[in-house]
Image (spheres, helix red, strand yellow):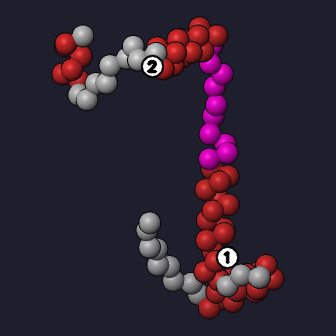
Amino acid sequence: MHKVQITLTPEEAHLLSIKARNLGYNITKYIKLLISKEVLNLVEHYPTFQLSQAAIKKIEKAQSEFKAGKTIKINETDDLDNL
């Protein structure tokens, strides 16, 4: 968790507190709400891509091999030399 300190002009603080009170918040909670909405908006607009059927089949095969115990845990890249 990060702590952020901002300085508002009296006018900014007054306008924010009016809006916050209308929503039933104090100014701090209202600012957190604004930041949360902005972050959510950012995340919702990340591009998404559809996997090909070949990729989906490879994933399903890998998952079934993992469940069957056919996989090996690799802790570092040097472990690849032992395969």
Magenta: main secondary structure equals: loop
Which numbered circle lies on residue 16? none
Q: Amino acid at mark 1?
A: Tyr
Please state which of residues 17 and 26 is positioned toward the viewer in this rendering.
26
Indicate yes or no whether the magenta region holds residue 45: yes
Residue 50: quadrant of the picture: top right
The reply to whether residue 47 is visible in this rendering is yes
Residue 57 place in picture, x, y as percent: 58, 10
Residue at 18 percent of width and 21 percent of height:
78
Residue 21: quadrant of the picture: bottom right
Relative horizontal placement of residue 1, taking residue 18 as reference (left or right): left
**Within 10 angstroms of label 2, few (less than 14), some, or many (20 or more) residues?**
few
Q: Amino acid at mark 2?
A: Phe
Residue 69 place in picture, x, y as percent: 41, 17
Does dot 1 land on a helix, a strand or a loop? Answer: helix
Please state which of residues 20 and 16 is positioned toward the viewer in this rendering.
20
Relative horizontal placement of residue 78, taking residue 57 as reference (left or right): left
Q: Are marks 1 and 2 in contact (CB under 8 Å)?
A: no
Q: Which residue is mark 2?
A: 66
The reply to whether residue 12 is visible in this rendering is no
| Span shown in magenta | 43-52
Dot 1 or dot 2, earlier in sequence: 1
Please state which of residues 69 and 5 is positioned toward the viewer in this rendering.
69
Q: Quadrant of the C terminus?
A: top left
Residue 62 place in picture, x, y as percent: 48, 15
Residue, far top: 54
**Within 10 angstroms of label 1, few (less than 14), some, or many (20 or more) residues?**
some
Q: Quadrant of the N terminus?
A: bottom left
Cα–Cα gap, marks 1 and 2: 46 Å
Residue at 56 percent of width and 15 percent of height:
60
Residue at 45 percent of width and 19 percent of height:
66
Q: Which residue is mark 1?
A: 30
